Image (cartoon, rainbow, N blue to C red):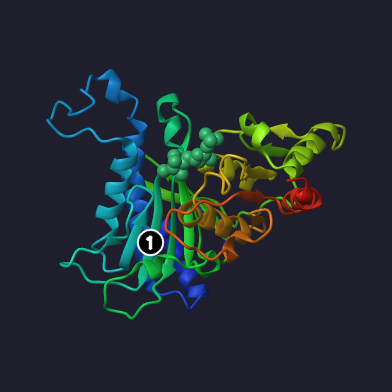
């Protein structure tokens, strides 16, 4: 699909649905609604720094409104934007322990929405890129009734669509409905997401590795050997470069565009690492695989993992296929050394 100047998110999704009859007009409606929520969150994120400058008390602002942590603000905006369109039977958020039911007054739909409303929140005060991550499934319990935890705990390969919004130097929405990955940049002049990255494909290999090296002492031996290998082997005369932003959305977005590997491993202190399977690793794995990449937990494909609970964590090795395959080789060779 040619990237034209005015290929808006809404038009792109509609045209995408013409190519894939199994998708219904409903998917375009709910993805467009997510785009609206992203615009509202982007506005708030972009003035977050002002909260201190213009003297809000931090508890309640000059209008007497409760000034919310940005995570909670984004969480509430997404629920408000998505709970009344009749698209969903249930939702779940990183910021809510239990599943989120659709209010009785609204029509119950056939989709499920899981999201991390604000990813990378520790970076907000430093004005570093942060994001929102979302994923959509079809319900597996009978239509018409409220959705259940069972609808939320589906393997990642069953995702219908997934995406993220990155609030950085510009606000971008990247999504896939399983057929190609598309990036839209928000044009603040008229508040539309315009197609800027048509059919993103991740390079087969890269020259960047991305993980928190502060945890080196606790890593599996195979990972230590892999990183030392990247640092000591010259590729076209140069070692790999290390880049780590600390926002998964920003680190994965760079990996998707430039190639390389992002890692959040298990370590001696956290057997399953830090990142959540359902609303961080599964959506990112769905997107990266749709762009030709690879995502595993070191042994198994992320999208095949059987979820046990809503907020469960998993180690993740994700990015260019050749780079992920190489780290898996190092991990397997040193399995006995653990
Ligand atoms: P969140 O802000 O939603 O809790 O996510 C933060 C995550 C993820 O964005 C990032 O990759 C990771 O935390 C960074 O963790 P470390 O600071 O431990 O490296
Ligand atoms: Mn997160
Ligand atoms: Mn979060």
Who is closer to the viewer here, 221 or 133? 221
Who is closer to the viewer here, 294 or 38? 294
As drawn, is 103 to the left or to the right of 43? Answer: left
Residue 121 pos. (x, y %): 42, 36
Mark 1 packing: few (<14 Cα in 10 Å), some, or many (20+)? many
When the figure is inspected, residue 67 is found, relative to residue 263, above or below; the finding is above
Q: Number of marks in the image? A: 1
Q: Is residue 27 visible?
A: no
Residue 50 pos. (x, y %): 30, 24
Some atom of ligand 3 lies within 8 Å of the CB belonging to the residue at label 1: no
Who is closer to the viewer here, 251 or 217? 217
Element class at badge 1: strand
Quarter of the image with the N terminus in it? bottom right
Q: Residue at x 67, y 52 (%)?
A: 202
Single out the residue that lies furthest toward the left.
64
Q: Is residue 182 visible?
A: yes
The residue singled out by tag 1 in the image is 113
Q: Residue at x 56, y 33 (%)?
A: 245
Residue 253 pos. (x, y %): 57, 44
Single out the residue that lies furthest toward the bottom.
142
As drawn, is 149 to the left or to the right of 5? Answer: left
Residue 262 pos. (x, y %): 63, 43
Who is closer to the viewer here, 157 or 306? 306
As drawn, is 16 to the left or to the right of 222? Answer: left
């Amino acid at each position: 699909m040619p990237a034209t100047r005015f290929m808006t998110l809404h038009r792109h999704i509609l045209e995408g649905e013409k190519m894939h009859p199994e998708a219904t007009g409903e998917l375009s409606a709910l993805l467009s609604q997510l785009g609206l929520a992203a615009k509202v969150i982007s506005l708030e994120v972009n003035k977050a720094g002002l909260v201190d400058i213009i003297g809000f008390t931090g508890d309640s602002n000059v209008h007497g409104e409760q000034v919310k942590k940005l995570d909670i603000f984004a969480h509430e905006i997404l629920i408000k934007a998505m709970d009344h369109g009749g698209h969903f039977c249930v939702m779940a958020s990183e910021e809510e322990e239990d599943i989120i039911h659709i209010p009785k007054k609204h029509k119950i739909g056939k989709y499920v929405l899981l999201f991390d409303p604000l990813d990378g929140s520790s970076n907000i005060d430093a004005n570093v890129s942060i994001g929102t991550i979302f994923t959509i499934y079809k319900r597996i319990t009978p239509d018409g009734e409220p959705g259940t935890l069972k609808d939320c705990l589906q393997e990642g390969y069953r995702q219908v669509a997934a995406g993220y919004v990155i609030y950085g130097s510009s606000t971008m929405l990247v999504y896939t409905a399983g057929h190609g990955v598309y990036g839209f940049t928000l044009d603040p002049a008229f508040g539309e997401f315009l197609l800027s990255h048509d059919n993103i494909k991740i390079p087969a290999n890269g020259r960047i590795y991305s993980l928190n090296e502060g945890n080196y002492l606790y890593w599996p031996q195979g990972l230590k050997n892999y990183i030392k290998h990247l640092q000591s082997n010259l590729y076209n005369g140069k070692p790999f470069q290390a880049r780590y932003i600390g926002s998964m959305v920003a680190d994965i977005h760079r990996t998707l565009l430039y190639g390389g590997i992002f890692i959040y491993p298990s370590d001696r202190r956290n057997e399953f690492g830090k990142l959540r399977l359902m609303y961080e690793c599964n959506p990112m794995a769905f997107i990266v695989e749709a762009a030709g990449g690879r995502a595993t937990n070191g042994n198994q494909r992320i999208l095949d993992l059987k979820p046990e609970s809503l907020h469960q964590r998993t180690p993740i090795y994700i990015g260019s296929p050749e780079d992920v395959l190489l780290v898996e080789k190092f991990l397997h060779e040193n399995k006995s050394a653990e």
